[in-house]
Amino acid sequence: MIYWQIFLAFFIPGILGYGGGPSAIPLIENEVVGNYNWMSSQEFSEILAAGNSLPGPIATKMAAYIGYSEAGVIGSLVALFATITPSILMMLLLMAILLKYKDTSQVKNISAYVRPVIAILLAGMTFQFAKESVINTGTIYTIILVAGSYILLEKLKWHPAIVIVISLCIGAVTGIYQYGWH
């Protein structure tokens, strides 16, 4: 019975919490604190604070912790599954609709409109990263990274993972050189 309760406690907020983890947090609190009385509001706020201090989606971190505290490893897995199930179901539904209508002119037109928007968003993000790189590491290092990455990726056809590791190493050496071993 506890597994079913854990599932419902996280599945319902997953369905109703439109907008991701932050919008589902009050719904999760209502289930965990108000409906099932598994913890107090103070304990929930402490779990929320701990979850916010860790990287990754907040709802899954909270689900894993609360599920584990109520029913061990299996409870944690049930809570995680319940948290991601609404998104999975919605993606499957939307994919079925997309596959059904993929050859229609409306769907093809959507792709034609979305591609330039994505290109503009990526260009803006690239510009912002380059600007921050110049500010944080200097123009010379930024030029070395951009030119070196271009040569390695486009001219020498190196795998992107290798280029990323090299860039990380250059960044580490640059950081140590600029800021020391703090």
Image (cartoon, rainbow, N blue to C red):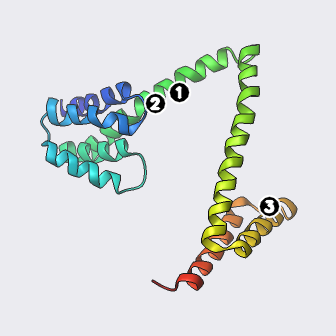
Neighbor class of circle 2 (other Cα within 10 Å; few <14, some 14-19, many 20+) is some
Secondary structure of the residue carrying numbered label 1: helix
Secondary structure of the residue carrying numbered label 2: helix
Q: Which residue is under mark 3?
A: 153
x and y percentages locating residue 58 in the rendered image = 36, 45
* Quarter of the picture holding the N terminus: top left
Amino acid at pointer 1: Met
Q: Which mark is residue 55?
A: none
The quadrant holding residue 27 is top left
Left/right of residue 84 with respect to residue 157 in the rendered view: left
Amino acid at pointer 3: Leu
Tag 3–tag 2 contact (CB < 8 Å): no
Query: With respect to residue 120, does 18 lie above or below?
Result: above
Front residue (pair 125, 156): 125
**Alpha carbon separation for disc pair 2 and 1:** 6 Å
Neighbor class of circle 1 (other Cα within 10 Å; few <14, some 14-19, many 20+) is few
Q: Which residue is under mark 2?
A: 87
Q: Which mark is residue 91?
A: 1
Left/right of residue 13 with respect to residue 43 in the rendered view: right
x and y percentages locating residue 179 in the rendered image = 53, 82
Q: Earlier in the sequence, mark 3 or mark 2?
A: 2
Query: With respect to residue 8, does 52 lie above or below?
Result: below
Q: Residue at x 31, y 26 (%)?
A: 12
x and y percentages locating residue 115 in the rendered image = 74, 34
Tag 2–tag 1 contact (CB < 8 Å): yes
**Alpha carbon separation for disc pair 3 and 1:** 33 Å
Secondary structure of the residue carrying numbered label 3: helix
Front residue (pair 24, 37): 24
Query: With respect to residue 144, does 160 lie above or below?
Result: above
